[in-house]
Image: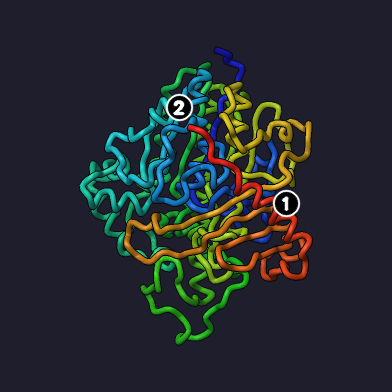
């Protein structure tokens, strides 16, 4: 065993969009821990998830595969257990491989074991526990199958209060605080699980830890203390969004058309939603600080690769849209900060990157065997200053068949495949004309220029067609 190989801490919140970071000075965010990691490492500004939906995105990451080759096309699909996964290869390389929070690799089988085991061993984990996201936890309990977090709340007499609160919320517009105390809040519980697991791994044993926070995913259920810290903060309005200007235009209080289309909102409601989103990001940042403090106290921080990213973004009202599921950048793009031994400090990379590049990066730093037929490429040459680019194109897609809604409400459909070369993004959808955005001249993606740029459209379409024609990986 080579103890000089770095530990890997992967901080992986759910639904954190790319531009809601502390160094975006147009937003009044508070992320001092993430800002410090950026100063001590490298940030990436052009990072796409390979599918803007939880299960496919996380499955692509686990396999190192582009979306169509991952065989996990919707939240109704499980990650294939006959495919080699990054966690298995890290384990085989001698790492303790841990995860806490929502792994989301078996969303098609929405059952979480009370002890947190699920399919952790089959996926390659040696330590930790698997729990669902916010909505799935409530649904799992209603079927008489409490997961580890709900079980923790049951022991404290808080499960009924919590589940009733989540079921009564209209996910974005219900911005009042949760009745839970701070210590029982989901992300705080996940961070404590991380601290407990790491504390039981011997110093000198290389480890990989993936911290799967449930925030800043909706609903906007922040604790009272989190809510109060943002009471007087104002945010800019969403881009390309219709704002209600009188009471007749506004949605009625406590009513949403459905979970994904909430109608026109007034300025104050948008601001309240954004305060809570920012509050969840700040809380996660504080929790990350606690985890890093533990690692430092163990004498391991100088030999730990710290990675912060997210599975997908959040529209947050841009283009009159909410959540993810779509090809617009707020849904598609995620933050990425990496610091650690040998990583360039204070660097900002414009390299075109996709989330599955982290799969190859983890294996590279761990001196583990690469996954066969892997599509991701290691970012280590960029991090250590050897090259400036690793991808000419990145890809994403979604075939949303309705599998993400166990609650039974209608499902937003926005099926697509796309290719991005760092400037031009081409989107294709069945029976529709292609969409081409120029992200340099039109960063808010308001103009389709496909017809006026036939050469660019044709070139990107041919590259996307090539990618979609590639065979599925062998088992």
What residue is disc 2 on? 198
For the residues labelled 2 and 1, the Cα–Cα distance comes to 39 Å
Residue found 51% across the figure and 42% down from its top: 70
x 46%, y 81%: residue = 250
Identify the residue at horizontal 39%, vertical 48% (top origin).
133
- What colour scheme governs how the chains and residues are painted in the rendered image of this protein? rainbow
**Residue labelled with disc 1:** 421
Q: Earlier in the sequence, mark 2 or mark 1?
A: 2
Does the image show residue 97? yes
Check contact, mark 2 vs mark 1: CB within 8 A: no
Which sits in the foreground, 49 or 277?
49
What label sits on residue 188 in the rendered view? Answer: none
The answer to whether 258 is drawn above or below residue 214 in the figure is below
Which dot, 2 or 1, sits closer to the camera? Answer: 1
Residue 89: x and y in percent read 51, 25
Q: Is residue 184 left or right of residue 431?
A: left
Mark 2 secondary-structure assignment? helix
The image position of residue 442, as x and y in percent, is 73, 66
Q: Nearer the viewer, residue 251 or 474?
A: 474
Percent x, y of residue 423: 74, 56
The x, y position of residue 353, in whole percent, is: 67, 44
């Amino acid at each position: 065993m080579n103890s000089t190989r770095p530990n890997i801490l992967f901080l992986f919140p759910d639904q954190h969009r790319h531009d809601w970071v502390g160094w975006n000075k147009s937003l009044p965010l508070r992320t001092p821990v993430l800002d410090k990691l950026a100063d001590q490492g490298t940030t990436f500004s052009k990072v796409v998830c390979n599918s803007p939906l939880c299960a496919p995105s996380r499955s692509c990451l686990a396999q190192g595969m582009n979306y169509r080759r991952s065989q996990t096309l919707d939240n109704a699909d499980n990650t294939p257990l006959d495919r080699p996964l990054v966690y298995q290869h890290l384990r085989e390389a001698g790492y303790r491989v841990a995860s806490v929070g929502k792994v989301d690799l078996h969303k098609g089988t929405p059952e979480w074991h009370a002890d947190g085991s699920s399919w952790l061993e089959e996926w390659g984990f040696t330590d930790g526990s698997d729990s669902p996201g916010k909505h799935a936890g409530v649904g799992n309990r209603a079927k008489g199958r409490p997961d580890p977090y709900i079980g923790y709340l049951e022991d404290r007499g808080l499960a009924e209060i919590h589940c009733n609160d989540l079921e009564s919320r209209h996910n974005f517009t219900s911005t009042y605080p949760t009745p839970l105390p701070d210590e029982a809040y989901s992300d705080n519980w996940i961070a404590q699980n991380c601290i407990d697991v790491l504390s039981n791994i011997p110093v000198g044993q290389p480890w990989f830890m993936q911290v799967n926070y449930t925030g800043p995913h909706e609903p906007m259920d922040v604790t009272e203390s989190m809510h109060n810290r943002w009471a007087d903060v104002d945010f800019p309005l969403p881009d390309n969004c219709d704002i209600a200007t009188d009471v007749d235009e506004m949605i009625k209080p406590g009513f949403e058309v459905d979970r994904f289309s909430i109608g026109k909102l007034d300025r104050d409601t948008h601001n309240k939603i954004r305060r809570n989103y920012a509050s969840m990001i700040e809380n996660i940042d504080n929790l990350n600080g606690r985890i890093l403090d533990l690692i430092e106290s163990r004498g391991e921080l100088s030999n730990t690769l710290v990675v912060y990213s997210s599975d997908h973004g959040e529209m947050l009202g841009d283009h009159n849209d909410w959540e993810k599921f779509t090809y617009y950048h707020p849904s598609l793009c995620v933050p990425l900060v990496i610091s650690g031994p040998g990583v360039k400090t204070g660097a900002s990379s414009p390299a075109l990157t996709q989330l599955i590049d982290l799969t190859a990066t983890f294996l590279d730093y761990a001196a583990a065997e690469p996954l066969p037929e892997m599509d991701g490429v290691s970012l280590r040459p960029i991090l250590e200053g050897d090259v400036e680019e690793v991808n000419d194109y990145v890809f994403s897609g979604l075939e949303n068949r309705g599998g993400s809604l166990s609650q039974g409400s209608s499902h937003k459909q926005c099926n697509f495949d796309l290719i991005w070369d760092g400037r031009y993004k081409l989107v294709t959808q069945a029976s529709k004309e292609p969409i081409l955005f120029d992200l340099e001249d039109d960063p808010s993606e308001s103009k389709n220029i496909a017809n006026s740029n036939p050469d660019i459209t044709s070139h990107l379409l041919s590259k996307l067609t090539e990618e979609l024609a590639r065979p599925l990986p062998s088992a």
